[in-house]
Image (tube, rainbow, N blue to C red):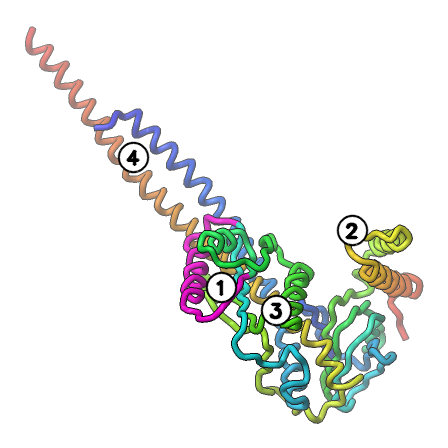
Amino acid sequence: MPSPREIRRRITSARNIKQITRAMQFVAASKLRRAQESTLSARPYAEKIEEVLADLATVLGGDEHPLLARREGGLRLIVLITTDRGLAGPFNTNMIRFAAREISESSGELTVITIGRKGRDAMRRAGVPLEAHFNGFGDRPTFADVIPLARLVTDDYLTGKVDRVDIMFTQFVSTLTQRPTLETLLPVEPSGDTEGIPGNQFIFEPGAAAVLEQLLPRYVATRLFQAVLETKASEESSRMVAMKNATENADELIEDLTLSYNKVRQANITREMIEISSGAQAR
Amino acid sequence: MPLLLEIVTPERLAFSDTVDAVVVPGIEGELGILPHHTPLLSTLGLGELRIRRDVSEESFAIVGGFVQVRPDKVVVMAETADMSSEIDLERAQEARREAERALETGYHEGADLASARAALQQALLRIRVAERRHREGPRHR
């Protein structure tokens, strides 16, 4: 039987841990709200760029720009988006496991660019060749943050260093569900023209090919930015849920410990009473 | 027929409302757009975007991007879009001085001169848009 003092000590430390996890839960909740807002407010631009690209694709053939050109085989580049910090439940682990499976199943050569320390550490341990690494983009990723990454990726593709670029990121489905996702970034595949006026009725200034030239690098940056924002929102929601569970577990632990503390205390009192009364009888 | 104008940047929806007319800084010169404009897609330069609605005029400092024009809707996709009333004149002037210094000394935080030049242009544009507003106040007709 542990001593009452020992149990008290454990209750105190469980309380302290609970305070920290609860604080982290609330911080994550407010960061999640902000990340969700950023993701939502970035959406109109992304949708619009995609629409314009679809319009252009109806006018131009498939091989108007090297970023559209499909190349067979060769080196595959994977952009793996994780975050810098842990204590977010299974979030980074899931992403890394997903990436590791994809990499081991992939035939042919590949190289990886990692965003976030967790992804880099895991790839290093696994001995996967790293092309470059970027630290996570903090709590509030801005569009300017992803531009160097976008430039690096497009340059690698245009110079023929790599022949295909994929992004792996965690898609934010809801607070409870985040899904590791793989998408092809390059070559660019325009979606079908969905809305309104068909592309061939537009006048392009200074010309369709010139507009495309301007558009494609921005499209690539926008896709990367979206992936970073989704990952950020996923991270915070995963952390929020993990910390909520931790707080609840601490509550349970405190309850159990308090119960056994009271039992021990009760037992001690009873024992002392017996000692006193048997001492009195013996006289 | 009203003309719906949307200004979007990679980070946010900067403006969405019906307007009477809008002038955008097209790559080949300023482009005035009224309702029933023919479908057009143009790249944008750096410059001032002016909106006219009812009795007032508003303006944005726009850097790069595209404009998509349909008969009833105009969408501006810009790198950055700052409403004139939201521009911090002091910060823009600070950015201007910094860019000028960088051009003189040929050094710009490790980056090349082209980006210093771009920063200068952007600062000058912001100052121009913000000062016009200060001089004239919100314009009424």
* Disc 1 to disc 2, C-alpha distance: 34 Å
Tell me, yes or no, whether the two marked residues, 1 and 3, touch with CB atoms within 8 Å.
Answer: no
Q: Earlier in the sequence, mark 3 or mark 4?
A: 3
Tell me, yes or no, whether the two marked residues, 4 and 2, touch with CB atoms within 8 Å.
Answer: no
Q: Are marks 1 and 3 on the same chain?
A: yes
* Disc 3 to disc 4, C-alpha distance: 64 Å
The kind of residue tagged 4 is Thr
Mark 4 Cα shell of 10 Å, populated few (<14), some (14-19), many (≥20): some
Give the magenta-colored segment's residue range. Answer: A85-112
* Disc 1 to disc 3, C-alpha distance: 27 Å
Q: Are marks 4 and 1 on the same chain?
A: yes
Numbered disc in front, either 3 or 4:
3
Numbered disc in front, either 4 or 1:
1
The kind of residue tagged 1 is Thr
Chain bearing mark 1: A
* Disc 3 to disc 2, C-alpha distance: 29 Å
Give the residue at mark 1. A170
